[in-house]
Amino acid sequence: MAMRKHTYFLLLLLIFSQVSCGKSYHLSNSSSKKITLGLENFLKNYAHKYKGKRAAIVTNHSGMDFYLHSNINLFRDKCIEIAVIFAPEHGLYGYQNEYDKQYFIDDDSPNTIIYNLHFLNHKTFRHLMKVADFLIFDMQDMGMRCYTYISSLKFVMDSLADTDIELVLLDRPNPLGFLDVDGPFLDNKFYSKHISSFPATLYYNMTIGEAGLYYNGEYSKTVKLSVIPMEGYWREMLYIDTALSWIPPSPNLPTYVTSIIYSAVVMLEGINFSVGRGTTKPFEYIGAPWIDPVRFCQELNDLNFKNFVFRPVYFEPTFSKYKNEKCGGVQILYTGGKFSPMEISFKLISSIRKNYGQFKWESYRNKYNIDYLAGTDKYRKAIVGDIDYKIFFKEVKNEMDSFFQKRKKYLIYRDYNFPI
């Protein structure tokens, strides 16, 4: 008993000492400078060209200006008729976890039929577009291939290819842009419509506007695309420094810090582990019913990550994996700075697999979920083979370098805010 109390004490000391020391990206907006969103740029400088036209809109609750005004109302104020709305995963209001089961909603609030973009195929989408003269795409992306909104953009662009319908893409920040390009390039053998469709590295370090230019330039080539850029934004900018309010782009990313941690642990969704869905700390809590929190916490702190420390916790998800079961695990605390999300997740999963016989890869129809999250089977096979992360990194580095160079000609924003 005394030994256990001693362990807790040491862990608390470790957490407090690491959180407060070292060079870090302090998530403070004391030096924030308001940027101009693509939405605001469009309303000020371009909307008059579309006055009286019928617009289809791909958007959700994140489609707001700096003052939290809805883009739908702002477009109407500019005399743009809203003919139809397409909402991505989680719906127009961003709260639905079982949204895939609905085809459309007749909603009184926007006074327009809202179609489930997740549900549609290309033929149906093109048919529904007949009521509109052009399409506006405006919502917050996360800069990750497995985050479904970038797949929504690809789906829309593939649907509009070889048509005369203009796609007006309103740019927004990449919250993870400071992490740079990371992870393997998509292997088409592991294509899936929603989490593994955009041809890029897992973390692509482009805004959604740049991603649209890249996809049109390298793959689609025939979309009538107009990207409306931001002003005052640079690639290394933390979201907190844009002066924008953090509007959770999906239900389980309530804070900006959560979104950063999410990038490092999303791959754990491919194993029999809870990532805190159904708790007050999604992605910050990870664990399982068969985990002893103190032991697990020590194992993870022994990995000596520069940007993360851990504290032991118990939690009980109200939905998702291990619903209503008591899980032992850790809370992940981000201490700031750059890191490789792929390296963190690789080492986390490797440690869990090594130390716990209950470990399993999640699968569906005899296929490993992790391979579709990663967009390759190299990641899983390296872990199974007990290969050091540095060796895995060398294997995918050429893919990263090739993509890094290819995307350069489509970038709108510079890397740093150099004084002029």
Image: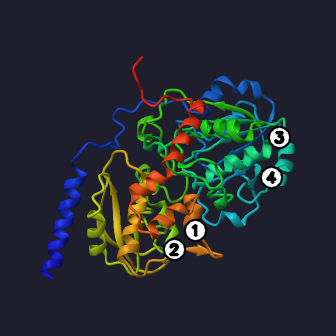
| Pointers 1 and 4 in contact (C-beta within 8 Å) | no
Q: Residue 286: x, y in percent?
A: 40, 68
Marks 3 and 1: CB-CB under 8 Å? no
Three-letter code, disc 1? Asn
Residue that mark 4 sits on:
122
Q: Earlier in the sequence, mark 3 or mark 1?
A: 3
- The x and y percentages for residue 409 are 59, 30
126 versus 119 height, above or below: above
Mark 3 or 4 closer to N-term? Answer: 4
Rate crowding at label 1 as few (under 14), some (14 to 19) or many (20 or more) other CA atoms within 10 Å.
many
Lower sequence index among marks 2 and 1: 2
C-alpha distance separating marks 3 and 1: 38 Å
Is residue 284 shown to the viewer in this render? no
The label number, if any, that marks residue 132 in the structure image:
3
The residue nearer to you, when weighing 274 against 305, is 305
The three-letter code of the residue at mark 2 reads: Trp
Dots 2, 1 in contact, CB < 8 A: yes
Of the numbered discs 4 and 2, the one sitting upstream in the chain is 4
